[in-house]
Amino acid sequence: MPEFGVSEGCSGSSDDDGASDGVEIRGRWHIVWRNVILMSLLHLGAFYSLFLIPKAHPFTWIWSYMCFMFTALGITAGAHRLWSHRSYKAKLPLRIFLAVANSMAFQNDIFEWCRDHRAHHKYSETDADPHNAKRGFFFAHIGWLFVLKHRDVIEKGKRLDVSDLLADPVVVFQRKYYKISVVVMCFLLPTLVPWFFWGESMWNSYFLASILRYTISLNAAWLVNSAAHMYGNQPYDKNINPRENQFVTIGAIGEGFHNFHHTFPFDYSASEFGIRLNPTTCFIDLMCWLGLASNRKKASPEMIMARRLKTGDGST
């Protein structure tokens, strides 16, 4: 699923084995120390932020949670279910809203996120999967951001059809202005609102609404790549790694029904159970009711039951 906003391996030190092209040589890991340092500082900042919570205004707590939900929708309803899987259609105002939310998420622009996510589905649990869970929990969760991409990720990723993404002016615009949009949406806006509207200190605003919120949202999303590929049951297909994980579902606002999602990736709800534990599905349904979304794709009950009986592990 989601990624970190700092590119992993855009540059690499030149050496004789060919690592200068910014990809991992088979059998060797090339650490991107910039990412290691930045992520370490980010998590240290988030840990420090916990001690500021009692000192902050209650409105700042509420605002930080609102930013978290907005951030999450930019990934779940936007980059994931809309642009990666085309599981529903969205009109221009909704696509703009989701692109802005996606910039607040700071997990790479929509185009890059979707390209890598399509590779994750097509080549799941192979070397062409950007966060291959067979390389261990740490790698699937965050370690894949600390090393250069495997050569197969680059080579096979180029074969994917991403013409639909390039045909969407919202995706193209966000990609063009991604860096400035991240500065504004991920850091400036979350920090300035509490300071301006209810007199919160800039220090508390920055660490709670920006740093802590951002770090939690990243880890909630990464758990889909790690925990939801390792822990849980497999009622739809026991022959693939992804699992149903309710803990991940809660943290990632509906994305933890992962065995279902990898079995039926076209389903807009990413779950058999509709709105149960699925705020993203509720949001998409609301957008349809408002006339801003349409054409929701859904696996039929008959299709789901047939797959359960054929490849499921017998769990419910």
Image: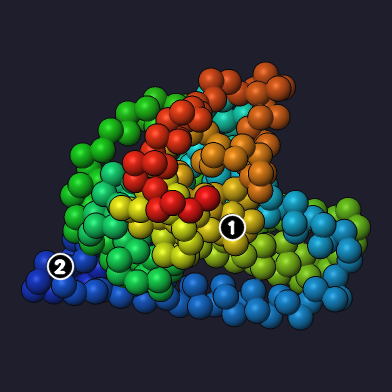
Task: Look at the image and tell me whether residue 108 can be seen.
Answer: no
Name the residue at 30% across, 75% down: 31
Residue type at mark 1: give it: Gln
Tell me: residue 251, above or below residue 168: below
Looking at the picture, how far across and down is residue 146, in whole percent?
37, 71
Position of residue 277 in the picture relative to residue 111 (left or right): right
Label 2 SS: loop
Residue at 25 percent of width and 74 percent of height: 30
User: First in sequence: mark 2 or mark 1?
Assistant: 2
On the image, numbered disc 2 is attached to which residue? 26
Specify the amino acid type for callout 2: Arg
Horizontal and vertical percent position of residue 296:
54, 25
Q: CA distance from mark 2 to mark 1?
A: 35 Å
Locate residue 97: give its quadrant: top right
Along the line of sight, which residue is nearer the eye, 169 or 120? 120
> Residue at left 86%, top 76%?
55
Location of residue 282 in the rendering, given as x and y in whole percent from the top left corner: 68, 37
Question: Where 89 sits versus 231, above or below?
Answer: above
Q: Mark 1 highlights which residue?
A: 246
